[in-house]
Image: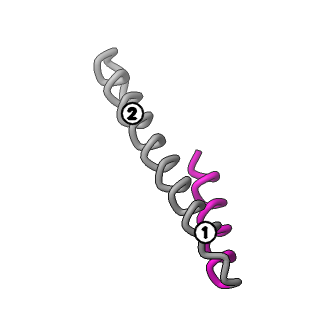
Amino acid sequence: MLGWVVTFLVIALIAGILGFGGVAGASIEIAKIIFFIAIVLFLVSAIVGVVRGRRI
């Protein structure tokens, strides 16, 4: 998932440099959403691992 975040950030940077403001803004928003989803999934996985008694 974090690979997708980096991909969308690179797209946003290239689009911003070339002057495509709408594409750059949309790519940044998509990257933010995917990043926060990845963080939430990591936290859920960590909590489940702690509850089950495994080490992270």
Q: Which residues are magenta?
A: 1-17
Q: From what the image shows, is residue 46 above or below residue 38? A: above
> Could you tell me which secondary element the residue under label 1 belongs to?
helix
Tell me which label, 1 or 2, sits earlier in the chain. Answer: 1
Q: Residues within 10 Å of mark 2 (few under 14, many from 20)?
A: few
Residue sitting nearer the eye, 32 or 2: 32
The colour style of the image is: one colour
Based on the displayed image, in which of its 4 quarters is residue 24 positioned?
A: bottom right
Is 3 inside the magenta-drawn segment? yes
Q: Please tell me which residue is depicted at 46% across the width and 40% down the height of the picture.
A: 37
**Is residue 53 or residue 39 the one in the foreground?**
39
Which residue lies at the image location 37% right of the left edge and 29% below the top edge? 44
Position of 45 compared to 50: left or right? right
Question: Which three-letter amino acid code belongs to the residue tagged 1?
Answer: Gly
Contact (Cβ within 8 Å) of mark 1 with mark 2 = no
Between 1 and 29, the residue placed more toward the observer is: 29
User: Which residue matches tag 1?
Assistant: 22
Whether the magenta-drawn stretch holds residue 5 is answered as: yes
Give percent across and percent down for residue 36. 42, 46
Report the residue marked by disc 2: 56
Dot 1: few (<14), some (14–19), or many (≥20) neighbours within 10 Å? Answer: few
Q: Quadrant of the N terminus?
A: top right
Q: Residue at x 67, y 75 (%)?
A: 15
In the rendered image, residue 31, in percent from the top left (x then y), is placed at 54, 56
Q: Position of residue 56 (x, y in %)?
A: 39, 33
Looking at the rendered structure, the kind of residue marked 2 is: Ile
Judged by its main secondary structure, the magenta piece is: helix
Residue 30 got which mark?
none
Give the residue displayed 55% in from the left and 67% down from the top. 25
